[in-house]
Amino acid sequence: MRNYFDTSASKKPTNLTVNSDLLETAKRMKINISATLEDALVNKVRQKMTTEWLSENRVAIESYNQFVEQNGVFSERLRKF
């Protein structure tokens, strides 16, 4: 899996505002809040970077898809299935 950030970087304390009942429920259930937040941020960053990459490369992707539609893929004649 691709890393979207330096996984060896040090941890940094931060202040957050969270619904108090949700926080207490999570603590009562022994949910690691820091790890949960970090996992959620990794997913959000991955989604955002993917969306940005697709947007930045949209023209090239569309161009390639059009080329394949018109000419097929280079290995098409080599396939055995």
Image: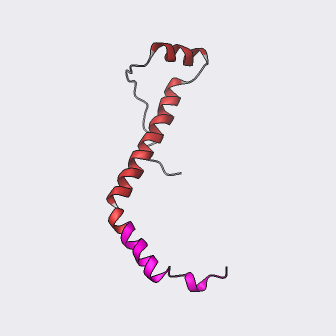
Q: Which residues are magenta?
A: 61-81
**Residue 80 is a magenta residue:** yes
Classify 71 as above or below 60: below
Classify 56 as above or below 27: below
Residue 49, horizontal then vertical, whole percent = 39, 49
Can see residue 5? no
- Say how the picture is coloured: secondary structure
Residue 56, horizontal then vertical, whole percent = 32, 58
Quarter containing the C terminus: bottom right
Q: Is residue 75 left or right of residue 68?
A: right
Q: Residue at x 38, y 57 (%)?
A: 54
Q: Residue furthest right?
A: 81
Residue 36, horizontal then vertical, whole percent = 52, 30
Q: Residue at x 40, y 74 (%)?
A: 66
Q: Residue at x 35, y 62 (%)?
A: 58
Foreground residue among 2 and 49: 49
How many numbered circles does the render carry? 0
**Residue 78 is a magenta residue:** yes
Answer with the quarter of the image where residue 65 lies.
bottom left
Q: Residue at x 45, y 77 (%)?
A: 68
Foreground residue among 16 and 72: 72
Can see residue 48? yes
Majority secondary structure in the magenta region:
helix
